[in-house]
Image: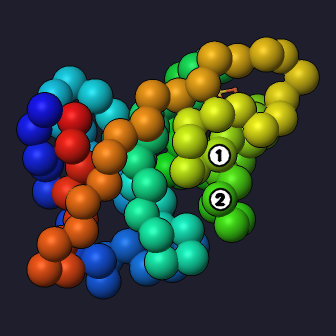
Amino acid sequence: MAKVVVGKTSEIPQGKMSHTTAAGKEILVANVDGSYYAINDICNHAGAELHEGELAGNEITCPWHGAKWDASTGNLISFPQKLKGLESYKVIVENETVYVDV
Ligand code: FES
């Protein structure tokens, strides 16, 4: 496991997403009502970058075909096809800095 800086808390306000690359993985970080969550940034339907989609509550809508993902778990919420859940990662906040543990 490696602790990787994503950014300052002020750079990821409530209702916003950010992303980073760490350990060869594309990682999305979402601020859901003041809590930070990290999941894989790549939609496993056809490869869209989910941080370019919409975040409403804990629900991320994929910008390409509209799959809805749970930012807090990486699980699929809705899509006509059954898709595997996305990997999720531990988030650590220290001294107003957001880290992911990958
Ligand atoms: S790439 Fe995300 S729903 Fe198709």
Q: Which residue is mark 1?
A: 70
The answer to whether residue 92 shows anywhere in this view is yes
| Disc 2 to disc 1: CB gap under 8 Å | yes
Above or below, 81 relative to 32: above
Among numbered discs 2 and 1, the one appearing first in the sequence: 2
Q: Residue at x 13, y 32 (%)?
A: 1
Residue 32 is left or right of residue 81, and the answer is: left
Specify the amino acid type for callout 2: Asn
Residue 28 is left or right of residue 5, and the answer is: right
Q: Residue at x 56, y 42 (%)?
A: 73
Q: Which residue is mark 2?
A: 58
Q: Secondary structure at mark 1?
A: strand
Percent x, y of residue 6: 22, 58
The answer to whether residue 6 shows anywhere in this view is no
Above or below, 74 relative to 55: above
Specify the amino acid type for callout 1: Asp
